[in-house]
Image (cartoon, grey):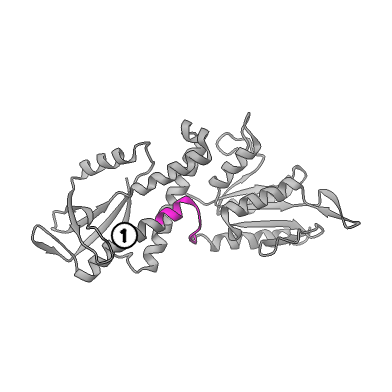
Amino acid sequence: MRKRVFIGSSSEELGTAKIVKEILDRDFDVVIWNESVWDKSVFKLNQNFLTDLLSATLKFDYGILIGSPDDKVEVRGKEYLQARDNVLFELGLFIGRLGIDKCAFLVSDDVKIPTDFGGIKLSMYNKTNLFDKIKEIQELFLKSTHIDLNFFPSSVLASTYFENFIKYVNEYYINNGGFTYEGKKYDDCVFKIMIPETLSDNLNLQFQKEQNRIGVEKISFGSTNRPRNIGVDISITDENKLILIDFPTTLSGINHAISYLLPKEYREHSQDYKIILERELNKFIESLEIIFQRNNCNDFIVIERF
């Protein structure tokens, strides 16, 4: 799934937006705010613009807002040129949802910049350097392909899933040199985390069906840092290798988050819902992979989609 970039601008600056899209299209899935193709359209017929914008911030990985000298404003008796107010609003909305490092303000160098925009990636362009400024933004986004942990539902869920469960399984494996099942010690083990391609409304039932298909047994073990034993599904391969298997029910939090933020899309399982869900599932996986790498357990744990 390619990373998705939203481009916002005033109607007068659509020409610049198209140039940005043409340059970024090779590396990203780029959508300009006014596109009307049904599966890419940001603003839908008969829907509230603010609702559509909130949905857009959940569907995109990056945002580029273009500030052009569209409006005259008077500040303390002096006249200035300023970007269209809806562009500034959308910039704030995307920064609030995606974070500063995932947004860029491509702004004409004759536009007044609000004083509280410190820290935001400002690319001041004119007729002679537009291409170079777009390439700067392209490089910024490409370098952030491996996400940092943020406060999206998926990243938070991944962090708590690791801290409350996976960490203890990994520690036991390291400290005890493997796991024991029916009196036999297995020192060569793999821990599989099963992630579905999509989430059903009844995630427990979805996981139960997959458990039945695989055919799992259960083991439990104690941890010095947990008041209760930890239980894990297992499977023994024909090569006599022990596979630990877990189905993270915490993923239901993604569906709950979408249902609260965008109840209509969730109820109808619309195209927007599917895009947001796939994006959040990918972020859950990417966040786990970052955590595994930081905790030196990526050799023991694998993620498998089903």
Q: Above or below — where is 159 with respect to 33?
A: below
Q: Say which residue appears at 74% left-offset and 45% top-offset.
A: 10
Q: Quick one: 233 or 41, which is closer to the camera?
A: 233
Residue 234: give x, y in percent of width and height.
19, 53
The quadrant in which residue 31 appears is top right
The outermost residue toward the left is 183
130 left or right of 240 in image: right
Does residue 263 show up magenta in the picture?
no
Q: Say which residue appears at 61% left-offset and 59% top-offset.
A: 100
82 left or right of 225 in image: right
Query: Magenta span covers which residues?
Result: 147-158
The outermost residue toward the right is 77
Q: Quick one: 247 or 225, which is closer to the camera?
A: 225
Residue 153: give x, y in percent of width and height.
47, 50
Helix, strand or loop at mark 1 = helix
Q: Quadrant of the C terminus?
A: top left
211 left or right of 256 in image: left
Q: Say which residue appears at 58% left-offset and 57% top-offset.
A: 99
Q: Amino acid at mark 1?
A: Ile
Residue that numbered label 1 is attached to: 166
